[in-house]
Amino acid sequence: MEKVNFRTRVLTRHLQDSRRLAIAGDISCSPCLSYTPPEASEQPFSFDVTSMRKLMDGHNLEDRDWLFNLMIQSNLFNPKLRGGKVFVVPDYNQSMEQQREMTMKRIQYLLDHGVFQGWLTGKGFEDEMRKLALLEVIEIFDHSLAIKIGVHFFLWGGAVQFFGTKRHHDKWLNATENYMVKGCFAMTELGHGSNVRGIETITTYDSRSREFVINTPCESAQKYWIGGAANHATHTVVFSQLNIDGKNEGVHAFITQIRDAEGNISPNIRISDCGHKIGLNGVDNGRIWFDNVRIPRENLLNSVADVSPDGNYLSAIKDPDQRFGAFMAPLTSGRVTIAASAVYSAKISLAIAIRYSLTRRAFSITPNSAEVLLLDYPSHQRRLLPLLAKTYAMSFAANHLKLLYVKRTPQLIKTLHVVSSAFKAILTWHNMRTLQECREACGGQGLKTENRIGQLKGEFDVQSTFEGDNNVLMQQVSKALLAEYVAAKRKNKPFKELGLEHMNKSCPTIPLELTVSTLRSSQFQNDIFCLRERDLLNRFAAEVSKYQAQGESKESAFVASYQLAEDLGRAFSDRAILQTFLEAENNATDAPLKNALGLLRSMYVLVTLDEDAAFLRYGYLTTENAATVRKEVAKLCSEMRPHALALVSSFGIPDAFLSPIAFDWVAANSWSTNQN
Amino acid sequence: MEAKSSVRIITLNRPKQLNALSAAMVSRLLDIFLACEEESAVKLIILKGKGRAFCAGADVAEIVREINQGNWKSGANFSREELTMNYVMATYSKPQVSILNGIVMGGGAGASIHGRFRIATENTLFAMPETALGLFPDVGASYFLSRLPGFFGEYVGLTGTRLDGAEMLACGLATHFVLSERLPLLEEALVKANSGDPAVISSFISDFTQIPNLKKGSAYHRLGTINKCFSRTIEEIIAALEWEAADKKDNWITSTILSLKKASPTSLKISLRSIREGRLQGIGKCLVREFRMLSHAMSGDICKDFVEGCRAILLDKDRNPKWEPSKLESIGDEMVDRYFWKMDVDDDWEDLKLPVRSNLPAYAIAKL
């Protein structure tokens, strides 16, 4: 009966309303829902968001804000007024060609305002950190813009810097920083991507003319996905097999001009477009063929190996494997910046989805009462808040990785390679998952391009593929861990790299019955992550040696043990991320800040325990304990709920870089707004 | 104040002082605004000035007199009320039409720019001259200056340059341009319109507007140069301008450099920081921050340039202020930072507490 009455009242109101509207004839004067900004309805922040932002962004906050301002203040960045606020976001409705031209114009604007000053000619720690910070800010505006700039400075510029020697530096670095030349990076081919050593482009040396001759011998050797090649780049670094007197010396890098300053394609070069993509249409990816292209001998980037004028091959590193390793080492910069930018993309989507969930209501719990805020539903909290905690954890991980990269020493190259591979894969996967969840959490509004999240899915999908396929990278992590394990066991020496030092201690024990206070202690959290890593490494080593004992080669034993390799890669990454979190927590002194971080850390660990089947599969958690963990996750959700707004405000992303649904979405969609 | 139909017409009436805002005027204005918001019969507020000024700012001479008598708190409390009034105007639920037929400076800008409609005329003369007085653009200027095209706001706020009506319209400080001879008719039309709908009001005003021509030497034509030079730190701004000047002889650049060099170095630094922070903040936060800065400037706990600037420009009129520190280089980040901290001179000195505003229109919410 209650239900019938309720329904009658609803219908009555509905009918009366429509009659009143018909008489008044003025829809805009009777808003049915009013928007209240979350800042007005939520509790005051329990911690200082500025200090939290400082902790998260980590460095160069003033430079970041300067660049945000530079973009907000220019019409090139497509400012759009919606609901009384200005938003800057690229117009993805433009054609691919228009988007590419806009990207180039924006680069010119940033160049004119000194954004790139010192990106290649600066040498110190400060310059490096500033460069990374500014690239992150650019990426918050548009991934295409960041990638186009990244290819020019980090790949082309980085190759000249690291593979080249003084003659290359003098000739190219300054010219690159000022965009006198536009560079690209021709490594990937149609037939070979992650397996760089298999590329088929071939270069020979002509000692009479003292020139190298580059060739694309077959269709699968065409260079593919080369960012910048389709429209703008004037020069490229070509990766190619080097053949001297019939002997293959392995992959080497050469500088080749592909266009003149007017944009005409150079002789003996053929270029074609990769066409429209699911994202990054502001980047002109192209394909390149080389038909006996002749370049001077000096264009070999010769930091690792050289060819003398009369055609003798010279290298300080005799072992071709090591030579290749030394060659590839500088390319970690790409993985570092990708990992960091993935976190910022997750931050954008969470800030939008959580702000929306603090203003959008759906369904009343009791008849005629106010409808409930989305984020007041425990199920909605469970969807978004664990991802928020993980994003915090990965933000600290990205900061750690950046410092590891900038302060790298020859001794740390291996660690850098392993950590950057692991973090790049885990952080970019996390971003894609977060984007999808946030998209769904915004309902229909998430589908609108102007609300950014849906578009970001297309823009960032590529991150799990370029600079090393995520799955391949994770296998490399397990492989490196195994090598470390084998070396330590064989020499009977303690572990002292890759954060494996915990393996030297006795195996941690997990209490049979987990209490709430144990679950939230950092000791337990660290223990259970270490336990999983240690046990999986032991199991992995045992399985690989079992296959080898059956006569399999090391490589095929490895391929066959892929399931454990996958679990181990995750175990390593989660443990390494937790350690960066604990480090960041230790650096915070302010009590309210520490409390918030403690909550986030517990959420990060417990939701990992809840989601990763490995903990049950290998018995690190009993089924009873797994149930306790799950309950605690729900409790943590409700504890994080009051801090949700403060936590996304701490991301420090200016309003203009979020989207209309993050603010007054009623006004942004009102009739009068749409007419203007 | 006059009441005509649903319109309230408020006239600032202190023409001898160019309608400079006294404490009594600010508190009366605040009362009127709050009362009119309650009264459902009122739909529109028109604010104008008597004589050749709209409003030349706050009565700074009065404030400095108090400070010199050791009573900076009374000056700061005046600002507290003024900034509260700015906040109420910025978040007002009914349209405010300000008729800027004459001088609009400092506090006068605060009393008009936050409102919905700002009508400039051929007599309008706008400036934010605070840096020359050893102060910084307050009254919510860090909000509205930072939202001007490119880095025009930095230029206006740091140099204290004067803008005419055409320039105000071009950069967005004014929403309409109407010749002064048509103002009485416009007023009459608005009274007759009897509407509180911004779209209706806007269309009524549009019947009287015309598009003025920017004068040939207008700074707005130099937006390219301004964007290039004014996006950096003060030191870099001056260096960039000097670099531009070295290239070619240019009166505009020379006078821009000159006004920066005449201004208080401390003022330049804190003004720039304030505008930069304002760009990413809502109006409420901007005002709270500006109030902290004002408290420091008036108490003189970090630097005494404000008193010195007022002495040189307003009291002794020797036009030769002795800034201390006198050079940009001697002002470290740490000193600038302190302007943005809560006052620690006095435990009971409170931050600006803004009134809670409810039922805001979208236009006002967007400013928060």
Image: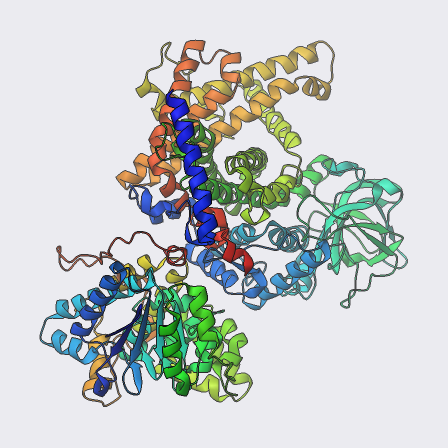
A16 and A392: which is toward the camera: A16
Q: How many numbered dots are placed on residues in this image? A: 0
For the C terminus of chain A, the quadrant is bottom right
Name the residue at 23% across, 90% down: B318
* Image quadrant where residue A122 sits: bottom right
Name the residue at 66% across, 48% down: A280
Name the spot of residue B249 as percent of width and height, x first. Answer: 52, 89
For the N terminus of chain A, the quadrant is top left
Say if B194 sits above or below A662 in the image.
below
Say if A649 sits above or below B182 in the image.
above
Say if A186 sits above or below B195 in the image.
above
**Whether residue A314 is visible:** yes
B76 and A198: which is toward the camera: B76
A169 and A658: which is toward the camera: A658
Say if A177 sits above or below B54 in the image.
above
Name the residue at 13% across, 67% down: B73
* Image quadrant where residue A33 sits: top left
In the image, B110: left or right of A191? left
**Whether residue A319 is visible:** no
* Image quadrant where residue A581 sits: top left
Name the residue at 63% across, 18% down: A563
Name the spot of residue A438 as percent of width and height, x first. Answer: 52, 37
Name the spot of residue B94 as percent of width and height, x first. Answer: 34, 62
Name the spot of residue A116 as percent of width and height, x first. Answer: 56, 61
In the image, A19: left or right of A560? left
Q: Residue furthest left?
A: B69
Q: How is the image coloured?
A: rainbow
In the image, A328: left or right of B64? right
A6 and A549: which is toward the camera: A6
In the image, A531: left or right of A436? left
